[in-house]
Amino acid sequence: MKDLTVRHVWEAKERIQSTVSSTPLLYSLPLSKRLDVPVFLKLEQLHPTGSFKLRGATNMINNLSEEEKATGVTTFSTGNHGFAVAFAASCLGLRAVICISENVPPSKVEALKESGAELHIEGKGQDDAEAACYRLRDEEGLTVIPPFDHPDIIAGQGTIGLEILEELPQVTTVMGGLSGGGLLSGVGMVMKETAPDTQVIGLCVEKGAAMDESLLAGKPVVIPEHPTYADSLLGGIGQNNKYTYRCVEQYVDQRFRLPEDIIAKGMAYLYEKHRLVVEGAAAVGVGALLAGTVQPTGPTVILVTGNNVGVKDHYKAVHPYITVPGT
Ligand SMILES: *Cc1c(COP(=O)(O)O)cnc(C)c1O
């Protein structure tokens, strides 16, 4: 793929560095002791919008022509990409319209309303929101900022991989949530092209794992969405997927589907041991280590991807697994 190489990731790094900070790589003492290998948490929930999606959105929006910037941008999203586009557009003073479905959790809808972007709510699922978004492009000339399947988005997310290699060149395993695949296409490309023996592991929800189903079927498939603690991992991969299907096929070594209790245990562990409140999609790496789904043999990085979860939803997920001493 000529329009997507590690060079593009370096270009993205330069393009986003004035507005997107690099994130800490936190050594996890309890996970390292438990797994007997050094385990690190890449804290991507620390971005001002609460997820790594700011990297890709900022890269693509900053790379638009002056004409495109003047008209504005639109996107469809289950939440985090929407926040990212709203924020990146507002940094440049651009118009942004976010198309979401009626299934997006109320906590995220409220937060999106406060993001300064216009909201367009339509349909029951990601596909309806996507259709609305392309209609706005045709009718109003807005540029669509897709959530994952674009070289600028993938390159932006890939900057995480550059930061990991800078700090931990001896890394042997990188693991994180897999949905549309923008995250692991970018990070996977950087790891595999730079340190080919690194294991890249994608973690999906049990029901509604569109990328996993598609790769098993040999082509993009549409599957129903189910409620999950990891709602940021829901959504199709697009019938005309151009990049992430092939990148995930090429750069992700293994994929696993995680049941809900393992995701909730990951959230509870990050809360109890690291005092981190993160959403289910961000806790899949920890859940997979705790459950023994993934058994790393060397320095391991878990992508802690986002924190957009309502406090009540977080409490509901973690409270069965939290032990309060003396009670
Ligand atoms: C989007 C997202 C993911 C998955 O990223 P893809 O590029 O869609 O595979 C994981 N975690 C969080 C918090 C996200 O918002």
Image: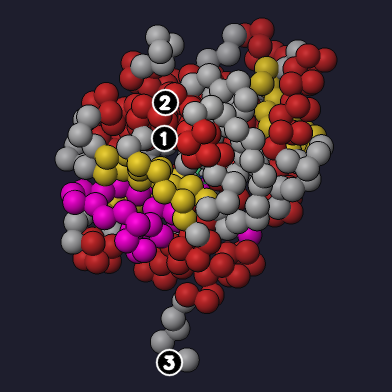
Check the image and report above or below for 290 versus 214.
below
Residue 57: percent from left, percent from top? 55, 28
Of circles 1 and 2, the one toward us is 2
170 horizontally vs 254: left or right: left
33 horizontally vs 312: left or right: left
Check the image and report above or below for 185 versus 317.
above
Q: Earlier in the sequence, mark 1 or mark 2?
A: 1
Residue 71: percent from left, percent from top? 73, 14
Q: Write down the residue under mark 2.
A: 247
What kind of element bears circle 3?
A: loop
- What is the CA distance from the residue labelled 3 to the residue labelled 2? 50 Å
Contact? badges 3 and 1 (CB < 8 Å): no
What kind of element bears circle 1?
A: helix
| Amino acid type at image mark 2 | Cys
Q: Earlier in the sequence, mark 3 or mark 2?
A: 2
Neighbor class of circle 3 (other Cα within 10 Å; few <14, some 14-19, many 20+) is: few
Question: Is the residue at mark 1 in contact range of ligand 1, meaning its CB lies under 8 Å from it?
Answer: yes
Q: Write down the residue under mark 3.
A: 326
- Residue at image point 31% right, 43% down: 174
- What is the CA distance from the residue labelled 1 to the residue labelled 2? 8 Å
Check the image and report above or below for 174 versus 287.
above
Q: Magenta stretch? A: 282-310
- Residue at image point 26% right, 44% down: 173
Residue 45: percent from left, percent from top? 47, 48
- What is the CA distance from the residue labelled 3 to the residue labelled 1? 42 Å
Contact? badges 1 and 2 (CB < 8 Å): yes
- Residue at image point 41% right, 35% down: 184
Q: Write down the residue under mark 1.
A: 184
